[in-house]
Image: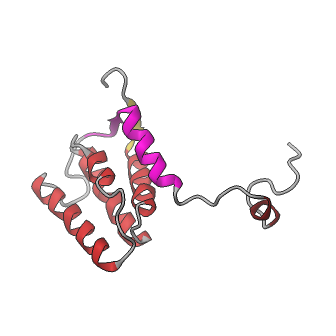
C-alpha cells in the first residue's frame, strides 16, 4: 500500500460506494449496482472512487439514474470487467480526501440528529445508561 492512502476491504468499498451512490440520488437498487461495480473495479486495481464521485449532483429521477447506470456499465466494459471474481486484489486503497468526499455523499442518507428522532428511537433515545 502506498503511504498516505487508507486501506479498505472490498466489502467496505462496496458498502461505501453503494451508500455514496444513494446519497447522490440513485435508488437503492441502482446504488447497489454501483457498489458491486466499485468492488469489481477495486478487485482489478482500477480507479473505483471516480465511478462514484462522478455521481455527485445526480438528479433523483429515472432518466438520470438510467444514464448513470449506463456510464457504470460502460466503465466496467472499458475495464474489461463483468463478472465477480475476475480480479485478484483483496483490498483497496483510497486517498483521504477521496474517502472524505465519498463519506460526505454517504452521509446524505443518514437521519439528522434531533430531539424528535431520539424520541422516536434513534440512537440511545433520551437516556444513555452505559
User: Relative to 94, is 83 above or below?
Assistant: below
Which residue is found at the position 22% from the left and 40% from the top? 45
Q: Tell me which segment is drawn in magenta.
A: 89-107
Q: Name the quarter where the N terminus is drawn.
A: top left
Q: Is 61 a magenta residue?
A: no
In this view, which residue lies farthest toward the bottom? 62
User: Relative to 22, is 87 above or below?
Assistant: above
Residue 96 relative to residue 119: left or right: left
Residue 73 relative to residue 22: left or right: left
Q: Is 93 a magenta residue?
A: yes
Counting labels gives: 0
Residues 68 and 37: in front is 68
Q: Main secondary structure of the magenta part?
A: helix
Which residue is found at the position 32% from the left and 60% from the top? 34
Which residue is found at the position 85% from the left and 42% from the top? 130
Which residue is found at the position 37% from the left and 45% from the top? 10
Residues 11 and 77: in front is 77
**Residue 7, percent from left and from top:** 40, 32
Amino acid at each position: 500500500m502506498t503511504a498516505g492512502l487508507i486501506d479498505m476491504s472490498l466489502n467496505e468499498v462496496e458498502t461505501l460506494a453503494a451508500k455514496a451512490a444513494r446519497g447522490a440520488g440513485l435508488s437503492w437498487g441502482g446504488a447497489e449496482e454501483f457498489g458491486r461495480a466499485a468492488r469489481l473495479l477495486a478487485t482489478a486495481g482500477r480507479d473505483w472512487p471516480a465511478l462514484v464521485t462522478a455521481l455527485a449532483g445526480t438528479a433523483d429521477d429515472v432518466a438520470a439514474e438510467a444514464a448513470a447506470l449506463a456510464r457504470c456499465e460502460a466503465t466496467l466494459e472499458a475495464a474489461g470487467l463483468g463478472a465477480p471474481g475476475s480480479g485478484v486484489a483483496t483490498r483497496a486503497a483510497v486517498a483521504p480526501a477521496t474517502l472524505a468526499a465519498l463519506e460526505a455523499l454517504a452521509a446524505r442518507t443518514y437521519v439528522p440528529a434531533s430531539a424528535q428522532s431520539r424520541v422516536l428511537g434513534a440512537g440511545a433515545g433520551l437516556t444513555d445508561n452505559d
